[in-house]
Image (cartoon, helix red, strand yellow):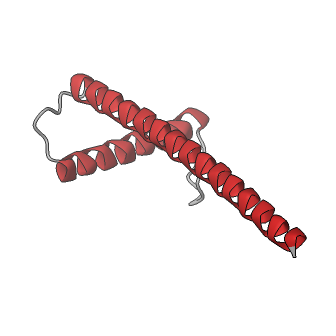
């Protein structure tokens, strides 16, 4: 009977150690996630600040800014695509280049 109780106590201790290791792993994972979120936030702020500075769009709402960027990308893409056809002398085929 003594062997069984010792075995049970040994298994309980092993379980506590495993739970502790699991907690450490979770803590590291949370810490890594926190650092990743912090880095992403910093990057987004920097990009936003540069955009605001060079595109002179201070005071614009997020919705208006999204429309502005969407239109800018469309116009730029259209000019680039048209430029390819103009330089090459090819007719547009309806396919994306």
Residue at point 65% right, 57% down? 19
Residue nearer the viewer, 16 or 73:
16
Residue 7 drawn at (x, y percent) = 84, 66
Vertical side of 42 occupied by 73: above or below:
below
Identify which residue is drawn at 43% across, 37% down.
Answer: 40
* Residue 86 located left or right of residue 37: right
In this rendering, would 10 be left or right of 28?
Answer: right
Vertically, is 64 above or below 1?
above
**How many badges with numbers are in the image?**
0
Percent of width and height locating residue 93: 60, 57
Residue 18 seen in render? yes
- Say if 11 sits above or below 61 in the image: below
Q: In this view, does 38 lie to the left or right of 72?
A: right
**Camera-side residue of 77 and 8:** 8
At x 71% / y 56%, what residue is drawn? 18
x, y (%) of residue 91?
57, 50
| Nearer to the camera, 29 or 43 | 29
Quarter of the image where one finds residue 56: top left
> Residue lying furthest bottom in this view?
1
Residue 97 in sight here: no
Q: Nearer the viewer, residue 17 or 27?
A: 17
Residue at image position (58%, 51%) is 26
| Residue found farthest to the front | 2
Q: Residue 69 appears in which quarter of the rendering?
A: top left
Q: Quarter of the image for the N terminus: give it.
A: bottom right
């Amino acid at each position: 009977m003594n062997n069984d109780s010792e075995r049970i106590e040994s298994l309980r201790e092993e379980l506590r150690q495993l739970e502790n290791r699991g907690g450490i792993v979770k803590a590291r994972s949370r810490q890594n996630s926190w650092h990743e979120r912090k880095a992403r936030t910093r990057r987004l702020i920097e990009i936003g600040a540069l955009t605001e500075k060079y595109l002179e769009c201070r005071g614009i709402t997020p919705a208006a800014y999204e429309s502005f960027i969407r239109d800018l990308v469309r116009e730029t893409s259209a000019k680039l695509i048209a430029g390819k056809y103009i330089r090459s002398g090819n007719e547009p085929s309806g396919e994306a280049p």
